[in-house]
Amino acid sequence: MKTDIILAGVGGQGILSIAAVIGLAAVKEDLYIKQSEIHGMSQQGGEVYSHLRLSDRPIHSDMIPKGQGDLILGVEPLESLRYLPYLKKEGWLVTNTSPYENIDNYPDPGQLFEEIRKLPHHLLVDAAALAREAGSARAANMVMLGAAEPFIQVSDDHLIAAIRELFARKGEKVVETNIKAFKAGKAAAERVG
Amino acid sequence: MEEKLFLLGDEAVAQAALDAGVSGCYAYPGTPSTEIMEYVQASRQAAGSGVVREWSANEKTAMEAALGMSYAGRRAMVCMKHVGLNVAADTFMNAAITGVNGGLVVVVADDPSMHSSQNEQDSRYYGHFAQIPVLEPSDQQEAYNMVREAFDLSERYGVPVLLRLVTRLSHSRTGIRRQPPREQNPLRLPSDPKQFVLLPSIARRRYRQLLADRPKFMEESEREDGHNSYTRHEGARRGILACGLAYNYLMENFPGGVPYHVLKVSFYPLPDKLVRQLFADSDEIIVLEEGYPFAEEMLLGVPPRTEPVIRGRLDGTLPRDGELDPWLVGKALGLDLEDPEETPGLAVPRPPSFCPGCGHIDVYKALNVAMEKYGAGRVFSDIGCYTMGALPPYNAINSCVDMGASITMAVGAADAGLVPSVAVIGDSTLTHSGMTGLLDAVNKKSPVTIIISDNDVTAMTGGQLPAGLGKIEQICLGVGVEKEHLHTIVPLRKHHEENVKIMEEELAYEGVSVIVARRECVRVAAARKKNKNR
Ligand code: SF4
């Protein structure tokens, strides 16, 4: 078993929280894991991505080899396309549909979706709406984690426990909102699949 | 199941130092090394055992303090990014001559591909230059183990030891097995009271000692159970020399085992004996290394050898610059890998930009107006968030070279007749390496206007407390800036006219003026508020 996931988004969207939840859950299942992230000169609003590798055998490279990723999980549609070189031919692109438009030459979102629909396996999720329903627009990242759940071979129980652990400091309400968001994302993915 | 910690490479280094009984950790923030110190600062273990762990003003002061702690017999670690070692190089080179008392480990994180740096220099050359052992882990667990050994090595041979990291190792998280913690060293003076006195007569003796120890470093390098290992593959004609992280990219391509001879290198000097064996067994050798072609050039020699053939970054088998990745390595080894998809043209780059409401924006808006009558090309800047002033729509600055260079370059340009010349520098950069340049400017009454864009924090690396917090005006006055030409302004839209006027007046003054533009970094302000409410 091996799953290679590219997480993509914009600084401030909570990419690294998604990575942390999957990471915590994977450690609980005694899986091997490597999670690399690029940040640094990414002030709020810059490109942020993370490579997350899970396996039941030791993992060598921190980076996913180009053309071998199983899943691109985007919290922003343009960013999800940026890392296509890492996706394998049969891989999935799962992304939030809300554009984060902080550059003048941001393309027409319709064109972005068209580009995404060209891929054999894709899933577009209106994470912003689902997050608001769950109680907070900030939880869009957990909606996306939920939407990716069917592709990640880590049990739900462990993912939910990891969400609890990660957000515990922020109080029970935040924990519950994030778990709700996660479940909503999962349901959305299941409806399509 | 044995308990594992889930740590970044940087954090594994930090945890290892704590477990190795370090008494002091010294650093100046710089990507990708920052998280080492941040981990030590947040660690309860460090708090409980009184480990010293404050940020230093710059990498040189950090290295000197670490050397002082080593002098006193205790273990010290100093951490920085690759260009930081340029700043600390004076201490670093001389520490190789003084040698150490307590173990001294110098951790340097290189940034190949320049994810957030101005060059991709390779710190292994510094280790070679100083003639001390260099350790280069291939993964995070090895990094953990190596820190421990680096301290032991340092004490065994009485030299500082360099640990070289690279971005992908520093910023990748994985499960880490710990070793039982070791006690800190007691306070103990060096047995030779003159060891650290580098008067020529003593320095010559110390240097000869370092040279005499070189064969011992080679023994370490060639040790059977050491960090360099040679695996022969019966019948193969090709050999691979894989350094540090590159070893992982090699292994990634051959899950079933590498069908070539492999020399894994994680310790320098390069192991003569093992390299000789690799030469004897191979017709062709491919060198895989992150950074410059350091090992490759050594293997090639002068004049470049042709037997065996040496391939790598120099003959185009691999790109000459930038970081490696598994795909590049696989291709270089001739594997039949498909070309990856290209990023669709629609996915335009999203360059870094100021956070909305950032004070630097207001500084540049005012400065651009004030500079209108002089024309473009006169503003020297420095390293920090404000370097983004080079990007549109501001296009406000003309240089970013090294920490502190804005003031001194403005002085030099003014010397050449470019009057007025302007410097834009941050508060943290000023106290890192700008103050001495400011003194030069004051002493020669240079016609420069210096804008200190002070956001009360080291913002670009995530919001560390700057060394000069609350002291910037005092520092300027202390260095000799005239009171009448030192102003503090608040970079806010509502003060725009007033700020432009102050800038215009000071640009017209043919002497040193300093304008401190102070407003807290909005991002850090938000984080600080959140922490307070928690
Ligand atoms: S992090 Fe702070 S200083 Fe940097 S761009 Fe954002 S607000 Fe400005």
Image (spheres, rainbow, N blue to C red):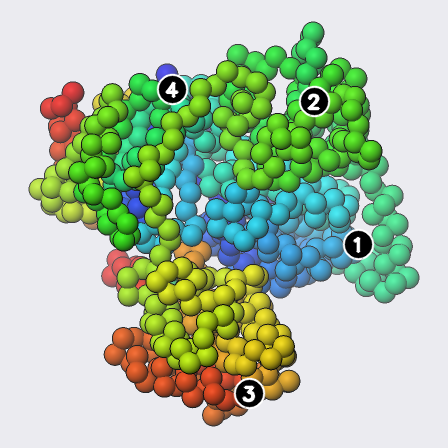
The verdict on a common chain for dots 2 and 3 is yes
Mark 1 element type: helix
**Eye-nearest disc, 1 or 2:** 2
The image quadrant that residue B338 belongs to is: top left
**Eye-nearest disc, 1 or 3:** 3
Marks counted in the figure total: 4
* Disc number placed over residue B185 in the picture, else none: none
- Crowding at mark 1 (Cα within 10 Å: few <14, some 14-19, many 20+): many
Percent x, y for residue B296? 70, 33
**Disc 4 within 8 angstroms of ligand 1 (CB):** no
**Residue B532 seen in this snapshot:** no
Percent x, y for residue B238? 68, 16
Note whether B103 is above or below B144 in the view shown: below
Task: Say which residue label 2 marks.
Answer: B285
Question: Looking at this rendering, what residue extends furthest in the top direction?
Answer: B235
Q: Amino acid at mark 1?
A: Ile
The verdict on a common chain for dots 1 and 3 is yes
Task: Say which residue label 3 marks.
Answer: B511
Instruction: For the N terminus of chain B, give its image quadrant.
Output: top left
Spatial CA span between label 1 and label 3: 43 Å
